[in-house]
Amino acid sequence: MTTVRPASDPAPSIGAGIGLKPPHYRSVLESRAAGLWVEVHPENYMTAGGPRHAWLDAIRRDRPLSLHGVALSLGGTERPDRNHLAKLRELAERYQPQLMSEHLAWCAHDGTYFGDLLPTPYTRQQLDRFCDHVSETQDALGRTILIENPSIYLPLKAEMTEQEFLAEAVDRTGCGLLLDINNVFVTSWNLGQDPYSYVDALPAGAIGEIHLAGHEQDEKLGDKLLIDTHGAPVRDEVWELYEYAIGRIGPKPTLIERDSNLPPFETLMAERGRAQVLLEKAREEAVNA
């Protein structure tokens, strides 16, 4: 078995980042914002060359990078695709990302890929399978990956809570966690749970990154069902939960996710600035504690 090495520890200078999108390449390259870092979906860069790589090469020289995968289908019934893993490792070796992550979800079956990250039941059998897939991925990459908690819209078959599932996956595989605050809020709202208790139940030491994103109400059901869209600003209630989370687990590299309805760079950076201020406040409080 390959000895898995952790991704480089995020340096204290890494603060709040943004998801890197082509319309913002030049703006990111020219930005002088302290602590800014970027995250990309590696599936968009699994080519030998081209303009996307030229931009990412330039940006990576100045900014820390995170690779956030969306296609390994670790929560599925089938093993991770070996060809995909090989391309992912090649990309990681090229760019030396500070962090790498994937999802507690599945998106492929029997050679068919779906356009969504689909939920997995929280059963012992599924936990065994998921841990096998995470371990295989880490062995193939030679790196520790972070696993992101999903957004849930309906109750799932469960023999344990989502937090227990994630905590045991951490213990068994040595993976870390990517805490998506918006996903916690959306899931808790939809299932009638307490988002603050969810945060309290996670192994704080395993959390290596945080995501913040926007959600919207379902068009037909209104506030009876919240949808994680990544197409709106971060809501105030999510900001409040984020401040609570970093007060408990400490400041962590935090990403503003925006995948649709992309705003001007200045607008996105204003949201990023709000996260940066809260991170700096949490660092000061940790030093003075």
Image (cartoon, grey):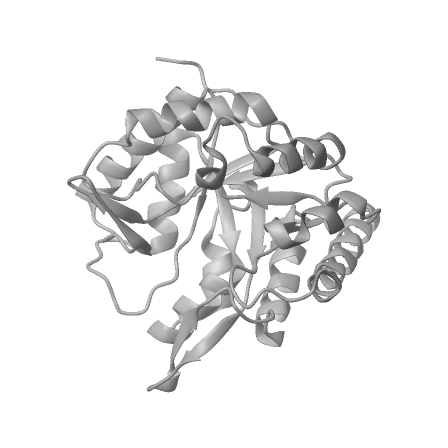
Front-most of residues 240 and 85: 85
Q: Quadrant of residue 87?
A: top left
Quadrant in which the N terminus appears: top left
Q: Give percent across and percent down for residue 162.
A: 34, 54
* 77 on left or right of 72: left
Residue 184 visible from this viewpoint: yes
Q: Give percent across and percent down for residue 32.
A: 84, 46
Q: Quadrant of residue 95?
A: top right
Q: Give percent across and percent down for residue 207.
A: 54, 44
Residue under the image location 74 percent in, 54 percent down:
279
* 3 on left or right of 286: left
Front-most of residues 34 and 153: 34
Front-most of residues 22 and 17: 22
Q: Is residue 168 above or below residue 153?
A: above
Q: Give percent across and percent down for residue 42.
A: 48, 38
Q: Is residue 232 above or below residue 82?
A: below
Residue under the image location 49 percent in, 26 percent down:
48
Q: Is residue 210 above or below residue 12?
A: below
Give the farthest residue toward the left: 110
Residue under the image location 36 percent in, 38 percent down:
169
